[in-house]
Image (spheres, rainbow, N blue to C red):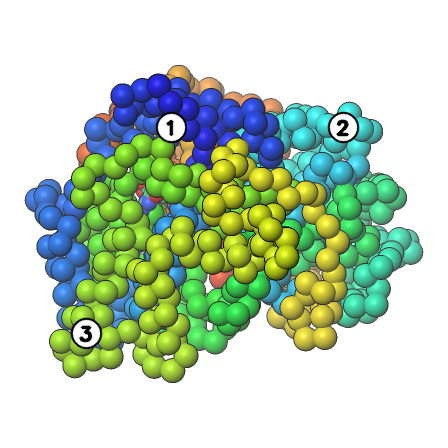
């Protein structure tokens, strides 16, 4: 028996795990008490790493849509030849890519998708970013000059934490890598600190908080503006050491001026006295931070929300201060690396052809994907580690559009609800067979740490990593293009050189080799004259539990990437969206209908762990939760079947009556709807319904293009055909 140490890569928490292996089989997965960051924490999902690996439904060989098994050589050749044909007939933008969330949790896939997208050179690049944190990237770029300069809550040292639209006790934290969040929140309260949660649902995090404030979904920007307005009006603005490099203070003051606590109370449902109290507490605490996540970013004012959260941390002087919102200095400095590659961020250099949605950082909002396919602008799609039929708005429309593609190839371990429509599925090995380093998540850590996970299990002969599949495709595509007399790589100029260098470097060094180069160039790399001290791959292999590089440290203004290294409190892009917010002030306060929000559960990971038996045990989880008042008005009781209808579609789900919701708000988790899957034996016995058959692809935040996946207007009524639910539970 051998014990292997690695990081769990299923969510953002980066927990250290100890995996016991006997005769090539995993016998146990425990928390690694010696991991300096997670100190033994794991959640019930960690065991899924084994279940995924052993899942008989997982694909192990490339397959065609009709189930024919192919050799890797012929699958990659066929895909590349067909891509080249489509490019020849319709141009390079006719090929689209969609990169899903697991790409960010996979070192090889991160490098591989970068190289592959570089070679493709298409403008039709989509990813899970635009159903998630796009507004954060836009605000980071506009205010601090770089899309990945993420301020991270210094949760271990703060004394006042205001949380909006996040439920870290269940999600384990997002854009805040902090393994063992419950322990950290308990410690915050034990040292006399205060936790306040603003959420339309009394969540598991709210239950641990000193105070929970209900907010009506979709109204956060108005409320955040009222907090800022109060700080200005009551003379509580203290820029402190930030003062010399902050611009736009007066423009921000003017922008939030009409949003008094009284003016926003009817819409938000938050009493003006509560708003004032919280603004004063935020200002008065000796260390404080405001933190907001997906409930405020996949939102109709997602762009404004993140801007105002960043602004509040600046107005109270807490950005870049101990216990406030701080920047990391990880061993691989993505900020510096991306800057060197010209990837600080860029907005609106082109727009989607049908609806004119803005590009950000070379990507278009995925809400536009279906219509781009329907209009014939996109004729081929390569999906890597994504399940957009379940994870993007109006999945049913996208599903129909997939049928129109001349080529759909999916790099995925499963024939899921999306990849079952693929002409070819190209399955990589699972996490336990791969080396891993969290390039992205270390950027979000509440401490600076570094950890490399070597492969735990040997791989089956001939099996490929994501990066090998992507490099194989890119190289073959280049050859197929050359055979057709076209430029083999990108379109020319700098793009061509970058694509060529990226692809060649990945082929030559592999992901771990590239990682080593990046570590050596990074801020914790070896320095001349200091022998053996720096972080390199060799050192990380010697220290398998991970290396602690210390708490976050102030780094402004040096780390700012704006012209003149200033924080822009009033970016023109965001100010241009304020009139829309002002118009909302005048709008009728509380609409009569119901608003739907989502819900994460501890044994789900978006759409893809439901084929693991441990993840779906127990009672039905895909339920529509609603307040007794709303249920009563519709003669619904727990267990009844409800028909939920929106502009985009309708589904039937069982009702769960609970007082945890604000009246007028209903909650359905996302990531279910496995009746569509074929070949997922366990998941199809626990299908649930897809929340994204109700969300609306036409509703995006106009500033950023992020999908609006919360506060969706729905009607709920008793389902007449009760059998429909019995069949789906
Ligand atoms: N209504 C609603 N919709 C949402 C959300 C919500 O809160 N509400 N949340 C949104 C968020 S935050 C996100 S991030 C997105 C996620 O959206 P997606 O990324 O599109 O979806 P996932 O469910 O994460 O699907 C991941 C797929 O990757 C595959 N996979 C897993 N590991 C690997 C791997 O190592 N390599 C490869 N190639 N494939 C792998 C899985 O089998 C699965 O098919 O969903 C978004 N959608
Ligand atoms: N167990 C589990 N963990 C996960 C995931 C998972 O699917 N399952 N997914 C991972 C991913 S990809 C991500 S991005 C993270 C996300 O991590 P979090 O951001 O913590 O995600 P949620 O738990 O969805 O929390 C969103 C909260 O916003 C609230 N909310 C909804 N609408 C509004 C609104 O209009 N205003 C306000 N103020 N609040 C609102 C919801 O009630 C909910 O409590 O989680 C990650 N971790
Ligand atoms: S919290 Fe996240 S990283 Fe930690 S064990 Fe659970 S899924 Fe894995
Ligand atoms: Mo996400």
Query: Which mark, residue 48?
Result: 1
Residue 302, x across and y down, in percent = 58, 55
Category of crowding for the residue at label 1, using alpha-carbon neighbours closer than 10 angstroms: few (below 14), some (14–19), many (at least 20): many
- The answer to whether the residue labelled 2 contacts the one labelled 3, judged by CB atoms less than 8 Å apart, is no
- Disc 3 Cβ-to-ligand 1 distance below 8 Å: no
Name which quarter of the figure residue 271 lies in.
top right
Nearer the observer: mark 1 or 2; the answer is 1
Category of crowding for the residue at label 2, using alpha-carbon neighbours closer than 10 angstroms: few (below 14), some (14–19), many (at least 20): some
- N-term mark: 3 or 1: 1
Q: Secondary structure at mark 1?
A: helix
Up-down: is 533 above or below 138?
above
- N-term mark: 2 or 3: 2
- The answer to whether the residue labelled 1 contacts the one labelled 2, judged by CB atoms less than 8 Å apart, is no
Question: From this viewpoint, is residue 176 visible?
Answer: no
Query: Which mark, residue 481?
Result: 3
- N-term mark: 1 or 2: 1
Residue 638, x across and y down, in percent = 46, 19
Tell me the distance, in whole angstroms, between the alpha carbons under discs 2 and 3: 61 Å
Q: Secondary structure at mark 3?
A: helix
* Residue located at (47% from left, 22% from top): 30
The residue to which callout 2 is attached is: 189
Up-down: is 527 above or below 631?
below
- Horizontally, is 420 left or right of 440 in the view? left
Of residues 526 and 80, the one drawn nearer to the viewer in this rendering: 526
């Amino acid at each position: 028996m051998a014990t292997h140490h690695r990081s769990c890569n299923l969510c953002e928490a980066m927990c250290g795990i100890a995996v016991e292996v006997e005769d090539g089989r995993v016998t146990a997965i425990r928390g690694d008490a010696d991991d300096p960051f997670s100190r033994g924490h794991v959640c019930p999902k960690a065991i899924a790493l084994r279940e995924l690996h052993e899942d008989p439904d997982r694909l192990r060989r490339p397959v065609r849509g009709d189930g024919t098994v192919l050799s890797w050589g012929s699958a990659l050749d066929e895909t590349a030849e067909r891509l080249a044909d489509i490019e020849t007939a319709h141009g390079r933008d006719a090929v689209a890519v969609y990169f899903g969330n697991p790409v960010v949790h996979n070192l090889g896939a991160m490098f591989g998708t970068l190289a592959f997208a570089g070679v493709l050179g298409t403008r039709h690049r989509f990813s899970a970013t635009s159903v998630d944190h796009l507004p954060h990237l836009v605000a980071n770029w506009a205010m601090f000059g770089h899309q990945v300069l993420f301020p991270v809550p210094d949760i271990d040292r703060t004394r006042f934490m205001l949380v909006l639209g996040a439920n870290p006790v269940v999600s384990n934290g997002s854009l805040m890598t902090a393994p063992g969040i419950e322990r950290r929140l308990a410690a915050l309260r034990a040292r006399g600190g205060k936790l306040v949660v603003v959420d339309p649902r009394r969540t598991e995090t709210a239950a641990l908080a000193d105070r929970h404030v209900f907010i009506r979904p979709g109204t956060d920007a108005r409320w955040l503006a009222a907090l800022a307005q109060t700080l200005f009006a009551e003379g509580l603005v203290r820029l402190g050491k930030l003062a010399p490099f902050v611009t736009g203070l007066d423009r921000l003051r003017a922008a939030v001026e009409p949003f008094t606590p009284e003016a926003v109370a009817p819409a938000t449902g938050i009493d003006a006295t509560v708003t004032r109290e919280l603004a004063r507490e935020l200002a008065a605490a000796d260390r404080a931070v405001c933190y907001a996540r997906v409930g405020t970013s996949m939102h109709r004012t997602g762009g404004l929300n993140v801007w105002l959260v960043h602004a509040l941390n600046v107005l109270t002087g807490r950005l870049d201060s101990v216990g406030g919102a701080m920047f990391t200095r990880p061993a691989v400095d993505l900020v510096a690396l991306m800057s060197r590659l010209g990837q600080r961020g860029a907005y609106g250099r082109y727009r989607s052809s049908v609806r004119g949605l803005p590009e950000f950082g070379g990507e278009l909002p995925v809400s536009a994907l279906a219509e781009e396919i329907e209009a014939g602008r996109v004729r081929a799609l390569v999906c890597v580690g994504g399940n957009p039929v379940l994870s993007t708005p109006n999945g049913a429309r996208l599903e129909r559009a997939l049928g129109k593609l001349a080529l759909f190839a999916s790099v995925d371990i499963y024939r899921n609800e999306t990849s079952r429509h693929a002409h070819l599925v190209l399955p990589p090995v699972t996490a336990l067979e791969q080396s891993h380093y969290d390039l992205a998540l270390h950027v979000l850590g509440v401490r600076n740490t570094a950890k490399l996970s070597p492969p735990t299990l040997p791989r089956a002969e001939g099996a490929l990593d994501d990066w090998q599949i992507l490099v194989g495709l890119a190289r073959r595509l280049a050859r197929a293009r050359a055979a057709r007399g076209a430029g083999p790589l990108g379109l020319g100029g700098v793009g061509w050189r970058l694509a060529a260098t990226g692809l060649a470097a990945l082929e030559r060094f592999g992901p771990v080799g590239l990682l080593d180069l990046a570590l050596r160039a990074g801020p914790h790399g070896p320095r001349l004259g200091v022998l053996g001290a720096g972080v390199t791959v060799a050192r990380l292999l010697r220290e398998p539990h991970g290396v602690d590089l210390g708490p976050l440290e102030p780094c402004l203004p040096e780390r700012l990437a704006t012209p003149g290294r200033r924080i822009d409190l009033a970016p023109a892009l965001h100010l241009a969206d304020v009139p829309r917010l002002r118009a909302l002030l005048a709008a009728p306060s509380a609409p009569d209908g119901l608003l739907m929000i989502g819900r994460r559960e501890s044994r789900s990971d978006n759409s893809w762990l439901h084929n693991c038996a441990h993840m779906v045990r127990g009672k039905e989880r895909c339920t529509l939760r609603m307040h007794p008042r709303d249920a009563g008005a519709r003669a619904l009781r727990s267990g009844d079947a409800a028909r939920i209808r929106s502009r985009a579609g309708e589904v039937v789900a069982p009702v769960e009556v609970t007082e945890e919701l604000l009246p007028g708000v209903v909650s359905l988790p996302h990531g279910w709807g496995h009746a569509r899957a074929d070949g997922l034996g366990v998941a199809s016995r626990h299908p649930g319904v897809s929340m994204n058959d109700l969300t609306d692809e036409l509703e995006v935040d106009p500033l950023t293009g992020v999908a609006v996946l919360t506060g969706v207007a729905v009607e709920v009524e008793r389902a007449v055909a009760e059998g429909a639910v019995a069949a789906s539970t």
